[in-house]
Amino acid sequence: MKYISILTIVIILITINQTHAQDIEFGDVANQELEEKYYPIDSSANAAYLYKYRKTYIDGYSLVTEVHHKIKIYNKEGFDFATKKIALYKSSSDSERVSGLKAYTYNLVNNQIVKEKLEKDAIFKTEYHKRLNHFTFTMPNVKEGSIIEYKYSLRSPFLTNIDEFKFQHSIPVKKLYAKLSTPAFFKFNKKTKGFLSIIPKYSSKRDARINANVNIIEYSISDIPALEDEVFVDNIDNYKAGVEYELVAVQYTTYTKSYSQTWNDVAKTVNKYDTYKNGINKKSYYKKDLDSLLVKTSTLQDKVKKIFEFVKKKVKWNEVDGIYTYNGMTKAYKDGIGNVADINLMMISMMRYAGLQANPILLSTRDNGIPIFPTISGLNYVICGVEINKEIILLDATNKYADQDILSSRLMNWNGKLIKPDNSINNVTLAPIKPSFTSTILNVILSPNGDIQGKSRNIYKNNKALEFRKHYSEISRDDYLLEMENKSDHIEISDYKLNNLDKVDKPLMENYSFYKEEGVESVDDKMYFSPMFFLKMTKNPFVAEKRLFPIDFSYPRNKRFQIMITIPDEYTIESVPEPIRFKLPLDIGEFLYNIKKSSDNKIQLICSTKIKYSKISSDQYLFVKQFYNQIIKKETEKIVLVKK
C-alpha cells in the first residue's frame, strides 16, 4: 500500500459515488444454475465466477470498493473458492476495514433452493504483520454443485492506492462488470496486463459539488477463460488479464501536487524510515559478541562468512516477510526471533560495523508479483548486498541452509533495488549466475535372474543443494527414504548416509545401496533394460500445445549421470543405444548421451543435461518441449543382452 495522504483541501471536496444498475441482483439464484454439473464452455473447470462485480470510487476521505461475487462450485477441487481472504492494510494511525458483509450458500434440496447464511463465527480477523491484517471468511455447507454469493465494501484511508482490477483467474468468469470513478483532477498512469483484448468504456460527468468533471472507466466482459498455472512459471498472476492504476498527480484549480515516483524517490523515502536511517547504525546490542567473533578474521571474505553464519544461527525467522522490522532489531537479537527485516537489516548493520560495504536490497517475492511502477508498497522483502571488489554478494540470513549468492527460488524475481545511504539506487539481478549441479555415480550389478543391486552416490551443489536441505529438514528420514524409493521405481534402499547437511559451503553428498527384484525385463534368453534404470526421465513437464508465458527454470542447471553396469557372465551384449548429442537453439541447453562397452561384461554410460539460462522466452517453447521429448526417448532406449 502507499501510505500517502492527499491534502485536506482536495480530499474534503470529493464525494463521488456513481451508481450502476447491476445486471444481476444479489440473491438472484436459479434452479437451473444449481443443477448445472459443469461449466458449459470449459468442462474442466472446478468452479466458475457466474458474476464478478466491482465498483471503486472516492467518498469523502475514503477510497471505497464495493464487491459482489457469485461463484458456482462444481466439484471438491473447487472448494478453495469457498474461503475468501481480504488483505487490510494499515498505518500507525488508520487502517482499511470491511463493512456490509452479506453472504449465503445456496444448495438444491428436493428441487427447492435452500440458502444458508454466513454466521459471525465463520469470520476471522488476524494480524499478519504490523501493516497488514487478514479478514477471512469461509462459506457454510458448501457441497459439489453449491453456489456461493457474497458482497461487501472495503473502505480505505489510502486514497492514492487503487488495487489492481483483476479480470482473469484460475477459473472462468461468465460475466464481469468493473467501474472506476475518480475526479478528473486525479491523474493516473495505467498499465494493462495479460493477453486478453479488453476495451474499456470511457465517460465523464460534471459534478457541481467539486466544480470538476468525474472520469468514469467501465469494463464489461463476458466468457473470460481460465488462465491455469503451468510448470516453470514465475507467478501466473503476472500474466492474468487486469489493469493497474497509479496516481501520479493531483491538479485542482491552482493547486498541483505530484505523486509520481521514480526509483530514486523510493530510495529517499526508505532512507527516511527510522529503521534505515538510525536503526542500522545501532550496534551496542551486538558489539561485544561481534568483536569476539571477528577477533581472528583478516580478510573481508572471512568477515562476510562469519557474520552471515552467526546471524543465521542467532536469530530464527518467524515466517513473516516485510521491508519493515517487526519488533525491532535489538529485541529480535535478544529474543532470537524476528521477521525478514529484523534479521537482514541487523546483518547489514553488523557488516558495516566490520568495515564492509553493505546495503539493503529491496525486492518483491514471486508470489507478490513484479512491481510495474516505482513503488514501496510493491516491495515485500529485504536482503543484504555486500560489495567486494566491485562484485555484490547476495545474502539472506532467514534460511539456515542458504549460502552466499544462493537465494531461495521465491526470491529470484527479476531485479532487486540496492539502496545506498546517499539515496542512490541500483538494479541488482536476482537470478543466479552459478548453475545448480547434480551429479550421480551409479554402479549396477545385474544378476542372471534379472535382479539389480548396486551403490549410488549423489552430489548436489548451489540451488539444488539448498532445495534438498530444505526439503530434507521438513520431513523425517524414514519419510524421505520412502519418498525416494517410490519415485525411483520402488527400489529398496539401505546403508543410507548423508554428508555436509549443515555445511552449506560444501557440496551435499548422499550415498546408499539399492536392490530391486526383477529390475530388468527378461524374455526367453534375452534381457532388456534402460541403462538409466530408475534414473531415466519418463514424463515431459511440457505438455501444452503452445505457451504464452516465458519458461522460468529459476536458475541454470546441470545434471550429470555416470553409470557403470556389470552384466552376468552368462550373457553377452547384443546391442546398445547409439551415442547422441543435441542442442537447443541459441545455445540455451544441450543433452549428451555417450555409451560404450568398456569390457566384455561392463557397459559405461555418461549422460548429461544442461539448461544454461534461468528464463527462456515463450517463442522457444516448442523447441524446449521437443528437447525434452528427445531426452525421454533416448533415456528410455534399451540395452539388449542375449544368453550365451
Image (spheres, rainbow, N blue to C red):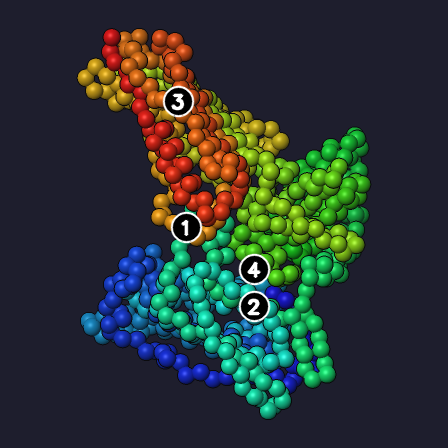
Where 4 sits versus 451, above or below?
A: below
Numbered label attached to residue 128? 4
* First along the sequence among labels 4 and 1: 4
Instruction: Give 172 or 128, whichever is nearer the viewer.
Output: 172
Q: Do callouts 2 and 1 mark residues in contact (Cβ within 8 Å)?
A: no
Q: Amino acid at mark 1?
A: Arg
Q: Do callouts 3 and 4 mark residues in contact (Cβ within 8 Å)?
A: no
Where 21 sits versus 562, above or below?
A: below
For mark 4, does the 10 Å Cα neighbourhood hold few (<14), some (14 to 19), or many (20 or more) residues? few
Tell me the element at label 2. Answer: strand
Tell me where residue 386 appears, x and y as whole percent: 72, 42
Q: Amino acid at mark 4?
A: Tyr
Cα separation between marks 4 and 1: 36 Å
For mark 3, does the 10 Å Cα neighbourhood hold few (<14), some (14 to 19), or many (20 or more) residues? some
* First along the sequence among labels 3 and 1: 1
Where 302 sits versus 66, above or below?
A: above
Tell me where residue 433 appears, x and y as whole percent: 60, 38
Numbered label attached to residue 579? 3
Tell me where residue 62 appears, x and y as whole percent: 59, 78
Who's the residue at 24% across and 73% down the image?
Answer: 31
* Residue annotated with mark 2: 190
Q: Do callouts 4 and 1 mark residues in contact (Cβ within 8 Å)?
A: no
Is 246 placed left or right of 557 in the picture? Answer: right
* First along the sequence among labels 2 and 3: 2
Q: Amino acid at mark 3?
A: Pro
Tell me the element at label 4. Answer: strand
Cα separation between marks 2 and 4: 30 Å
* First along the sequence among labels 3 and 4: 4
Tell me the element at label 3. Answer: loop
* Residue annotated with mark 1: 547
Q: Residue furthest front?
A: 586
Instruction: Give 405 or 598, whichever is nearer the viewer.
Output: 598
